[in-house]
Image: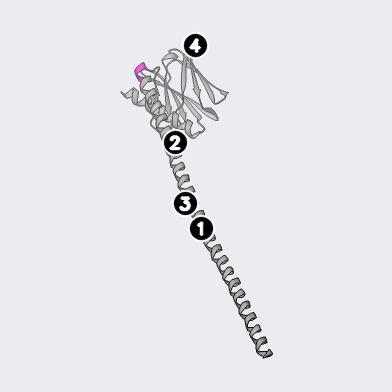
Amino acid sequence: MKKIFISLILLLTILSTSAFAFENILNAVVVEGTPNGNNLILRTDTAAVIKKYILSDGTLEVDIKNIAASINMDTKYIDTNGINNVTIENIGNNEVKIFVQGENADKTSIIFDTPASAPIVVSDGLSKKHIGWIAAVFILTCILAGSFKHSVEKDERISMKNDLTEREIKLYKELKSDIITSAKIDNMIKQRITERMNNSVKRADTIRAMQKMALK
């Protein structure tokens, strides 16, 4: 259960690092001797994906993805057991290779020492059950991320639809107001024309009446 928990922490750390595109730097390598063998301690910003290979001469090769070695990287040896040499190669493309040469180099344990968490021990291999747990967590993370994205897009569509509805209502009210105003103006113009015509008729009748009075 402890291995599963550590594997999940490592996976989530790697996923979060990839999601936010942080630059991961290998700052130091420490080889430390223990009663059970040697520890290869990698001091990095965050944990990373590694692959271990045992070469024909017994050398341990450690490939680390999504990481770059610091220019001023320090290498320390503390009470090592049979380790002759440690070589670090920054091969580009965000990948670093570490070669550990010496007796029982294949039994070296790899530990990530990061500022953000407790030291993480990387096991030699994961069982099918562990891989299933990690795959399940990864799939669940993807599903949750997809659901969150879908929810956000749905909220945006609803918000856009509401905005369009409010805009259409506003435009309708403005158009209706313009039509009513225009109708009122037309009615006023018609009333004024009618009043002028009536006044003209009355004036003409008055003039005729005055002419008839003058003839009498």
As drawn, the label of residue 176 is 1
Q: Earlier in the sequence, mark 2 or mark 1?
A: 2
Residue at image position (46%, 45%) is 161
**Quadrant that contains the N terminus:** top left
- Which segment is the magenta one? 126-130
Comparing labels 2 and 4, the label whose residue is closer to the camera: 2
Q: Considering only vertical position in the picture, is 35 above or below 172?
A: above
Disc 4 crowd, CA 10 A, few/some/many (<14, 14-19, 20+): few
Look at the numbered discs 2 and 3 and tell me whether their residues touch, using CB distance below 8 Å: no
Q: Nearer the viewer, mark 2 or mark 3?
A: 3
Residue furthest to the left: 1
**Category of crowding for the residue at label 2, using alpha-carbon neighbours closer than 10 angstroms: few (below 14), some (14–19), many (at least 20):** few
Tag 3's secondary structure?
A: helix
Nearest the viewer among 172 and 9 is 172
Earlier residue among tags 1 and 3: 3
Q: CA distance from mark 2 to mark 3?
A: 26 Å
Q: Earlier in the sequence, mark 4 or mark 1?
A: 4
Residue at point 56% right, 63% down?
A: 182
Residue identifier under label 3:
166
The part of the image, by quadrant, that contains residue 31 is top left
Type of residue at label 4?
A: Leu
Q: Which mark is in front, 4 or 3?
A: 3
The residue where tag 2 is placed is: 149
Task: Give the mark nearer the N terminus: 4 vs 3.
Answer: 4
